[in-house]
Amino acid sequence: MEFGMIETGWTDVAELLSWFGEAKNVGPRLQEIREGRRDSDGRPAPWTQEQLAAAMSALPGARPMSKMTIWKIENPDKPSSNRSVTVDELIGFAKVLNVTIADLLLPGDQVAQLAAFKAVTDAASHLQEVRDAWSRYTGSLRTARAHLEGSPDARSDMQNQLRRTRADHYRSFAAAHANYAPVLAAQHGREFTLEEFAAGQMPTPLLAAMEDALGPLEPHLDGWATGRHEPPLDSTDFTYSGGA
């Protein structure tokens, strides 16, 4: 993964460049990026040395570049190769290959290191967002429960709404159940009812929230991810009887 494909702080890049960035890395990295090039759809689309030279030659104000020049740059250790890269050429390579200058100056393992670290910090940030959202969710549930406990009519109305919502939920899986029922029966040695099949699917947010609001227990911290595979309280009240 190249820097051009991830969001990276300038401080991170500057530190890595000061530690590991060297002109000798340009040749090997140029070949690696050229051969690992992908198109706009993410499919492998490597360039030959001729194609890279042609792309460089086509840049505005650029001097013609040959395949031999690319070969010399990519093979700095060969006896017949002593071709250095100018700043303009370095910028040009970054442009035509859709990468950054850091991608060309840093060894590949350092690029991977920064990409991995950035992905981990992103994951940590997303996890904190999930925890914050879950805290708001449970807070809203406590408020809903307080209102329901003080109004039997409101609780009865929500229970009726939950029955209708659960029936709609079952109905939405009727076609899928018909297709997968034989497969499930073959795998487990018994028939699976539509209710069992639907109970194992991720519920809609409204269905999950109503179940939690009407239930006596605090929802599990991992409930946002598991989809609450356990049957809801009084599940027999929510059976889908078929029909439109």
Image: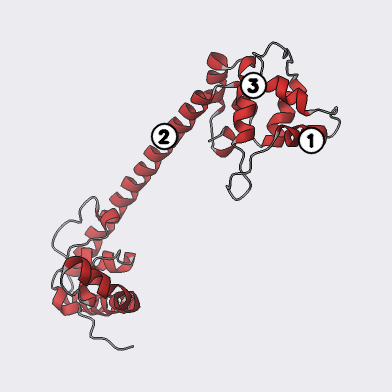
Determine which residue is flagged by label 1: 54
Image-based side of 191 in relation to 66, left or right: left
Q: Give the spatial CA distance, label 2 vs label 1.
A: 39 Å
Image-based side of 71 in relation to 191, left or right: right
Determine which residue is flagged by label 3: 26
Pick the quarter of the image with the C terminus. bottom left
- Residue 5 placement (x, y as % from top left): 56, 39
Determine which residue is flagged by label 2: 121
- Residue 204 placement (x, y as % from top left): 33, 67
Q: Of tags 2 and 1, which is closer to the observer?
A: 1
Tell which circle, 2 or 1, labels the residue nearer the N-terminal end.
Answer: 1
Tell which circle, 3 or 2, labels the residue nearer the N-terminal end.
Answer: 3
- Residue 226 placement (x, y as % from top left): 26, 56
Q: Nearer the viewer, residue 161 or 59?
A: 59
Q: Quadrant of residue 6?
A: top right
**What amino acid type should be assigned to the residue bearing mark 1?**
Ala
Q: How is the image coloured?
A: secondary structure
**What amino acid type should be assigned to the residue bearing mark 3?**
Val
Q: Quadrant of residue 223?
A: bottom left
Q: Of tags 3 and 2, which is closer to the observer?
A: 3
